[in-house]
């Protein structure tokens, strides 16, 4: 058991600590948009319009590719970790951004799922409740109509949750799984109060009737799981965290791995927590035809940080699941669905270097190659513009054309025409303790420096393997801690 700031980290849109290794509980990065955009959205906590910095530094939002090719960006946190109600649209034809209607409820750590009719269902998350007198997990849902540019309320879930999974089922319904919330079935030890636990429950939304129904629970509790939809319509839930947070009568807050252990939180052992992580190493598959979950095989030799703390998961063109992680994305596992077996292919070369793999997105291109860009210069905190492509046929990384701006912790979206849109992120620079700038701009720890947020966008063309800047806007002058152990 550990006394830590997990609850505060969640509230501040940071990371969950799983086994002492920082892992972003939902892969997302602060986006930035062109400075040509007017402020879009409000911080419902403050009730004031968002500033351009709020827009360019948004975190824990969602991005959804619409049926007409536009990209919808929804919610997230601003620099002060206030949830946002604003939404923006990117047009890949005109290469411009525009604002659209506000959410009814500001939220972050939510999910956004494009329905079969082109509308977008936004569910749950962390935001305002009870007239914004308190923050917490949300049960509410909203639907965006891109043809009219408006939001409409949808029926709420039975259980409020954030950092959950979402997937569109073959029949048009939406499956919601796990996440963080409060499980009424858990019994906590006397003198303790449960602040947050990890959920097993699952729900299904029917857009035709605007109703929710219970689904078969997961085999285990998972928040921040990687969700992959298979070609046959089955859904894979892989990796994630199972954390609980309790408070004792003195106000001391403690979190530990394994929500089932809240009945006696002081007695949780390292072996019990290790067993939870071992379980999370096993993914599970949901079959819409039967409504049941099936556990997947365990990985070989417990490959470190590749399943229970996986950084990127996708589906290869041959139907296998691929998992990539490591500080240079040099660790790979693939899963054969027919054989129910994981293998660890030998990888050649390396991808982008980063001390924080969980904030550097990878993108699977239409031709099957995997794009990785940005990150850090090897051996320094300076941001890099290096770009690499992984060939999944040979598992070989090779360098290609560099980004126009060094960046990391950005958002990347595969567009309908096969290009990749990248926006926002941060630039890191090393600074000494004698730097004359305010102390707030200097990181505290073994590494010192600043991180400036970016308001620019660029597009990668896989055919030419080149980047094109959409708006060479200068970095937004905002600072944050550079200590790599404090994302």
Image (spheres, grey):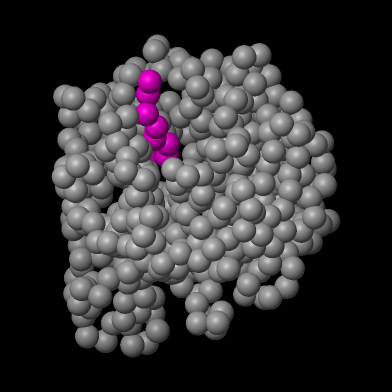
- Vertical position of residue 97 compared to residue 193: above or below: above
Residue depicted at 28% across the width and 82% down the height? 192
Q: Is residue 165 left or right of residue 40?
A: left
- Vertical position of residue 285 compared to residue 128: above or below: above
- Out of 366 and 46, give the one closest to the viewer: 366
Residue depicted at 26% across the width and 86% down the height? 191
Residue depicted at 68% across the width and 19% down the height? 466
Q: Is residue 337 left or right of residue 477?
A: left
Q: Is residue 475 left or right of residue 413?
A: right
Residue 173, position as x, y percentages in the image: 34, 50
- Out of 380 and 108, give the one closest to the viewer: 108
Q: Is residue 430 visible?
A: no
Residue 80, position as x, y percentages in the image: 65, 66
Residue stretch rendered in magenta on the structure: 307-317
Residue depicted at 45% across the width and 64% down the height? 154
Asked if residue 311 is among those painted magenta in the image, a careful observer would answer: yes
């Amino acid at each position: 058991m550990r006394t830590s700031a997990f609850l505060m980290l969640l509230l501040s849109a940071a990371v969950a600590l799983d086994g002492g290794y920082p892992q972003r509980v939902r892969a997302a990065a602060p986006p930035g948009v062109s400075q040509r955009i007017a402020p879009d959205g409000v911080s419902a906590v403050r009730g004031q319009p968002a500033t351009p910095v709020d827009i360019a530094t948004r975190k824990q939002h969602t991005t959804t590719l619409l049926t007409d090719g536009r990209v919808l960006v929804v919610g997230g946190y601003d620099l002060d970790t206030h949830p946002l109600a604003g939404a923006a649209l990117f047009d890949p034809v005109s290469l411009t951004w525009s604002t659209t209607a506000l959410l009814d409820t500001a939220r972050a750590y939510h999910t956004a799922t494009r329905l079969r009719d082109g509308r977008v269902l936004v569910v749950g998350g962390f935001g305002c409740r009870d007239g914004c007198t308190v923050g917490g997990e949300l049960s509410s849902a909203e639907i965006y109509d891109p043809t009219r540019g408006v939001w409409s309320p949808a029926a709420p879930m039975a259980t409020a949750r954030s950092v959950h999974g979402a997937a569109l089922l073959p029949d048009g319904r939406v499956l919601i799984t796990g996440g963080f919330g409060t499980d009424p079935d858990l019994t906590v030890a006397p003198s303790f109060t449960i602040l947050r636990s990890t959920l097993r429950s699952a729900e299904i939304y029917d857009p035709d009737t605007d109703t929710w129904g219970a689904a078969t629970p997961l085999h285990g509790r998972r928040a921040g799981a990687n969700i992959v939809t298979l070609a046959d319509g089955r859904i894979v839930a892989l990796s994630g965290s199972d954390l609980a947070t309790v408070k004792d009568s003195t106000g001391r807050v403690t979190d530990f791995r394994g929500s089932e252990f809240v009945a006696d939180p002081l007695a949780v052992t390292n072996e019990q927590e290790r067993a939870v992580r071992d379980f999370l190493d096993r993914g599970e598959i949901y079959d819409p035809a039967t409504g049941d979950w099936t556990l997947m095989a365990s990985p070989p030799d417990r490959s470190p940080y590749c399943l229970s703390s996986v950084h990127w998961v996708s589906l290869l063109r041959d139907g296998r699941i691929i998992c990539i992680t490591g500080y240079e994305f040099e660790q790979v596992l693939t899963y054969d669905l027919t054989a129910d077996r994981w293998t660890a292919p030998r990888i050649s070369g390396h991808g982008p270097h980063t001390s924080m793999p969980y904030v550097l997105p990878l993108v699977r291109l239409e031709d099957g190659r995997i794009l990785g860009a940005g990150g850090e210069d090897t051996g320094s905190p300076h941001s890099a513009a290096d770009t690499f492509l992984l060939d999944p046929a040979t598992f070989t990384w090779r360098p290609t054309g560099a980004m126009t701006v060094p960046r990391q912790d950005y958002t990347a979206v595969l567009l309908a025409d096969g290009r990749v849109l990248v926006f926002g992120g941060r630039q890191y620079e090393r600074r000494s303790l004698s730097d004359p700038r305010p102390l707030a701009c200097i990181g505290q720890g073994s590494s010192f420096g600043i991180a400036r947020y970016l308001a620019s966008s660029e597009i990668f063309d896989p055919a030419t393997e080149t980047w094109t800047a959409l708006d060479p806007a200068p970095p937004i002058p905002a600072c944050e801690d550079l200590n790599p152990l404090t994302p």
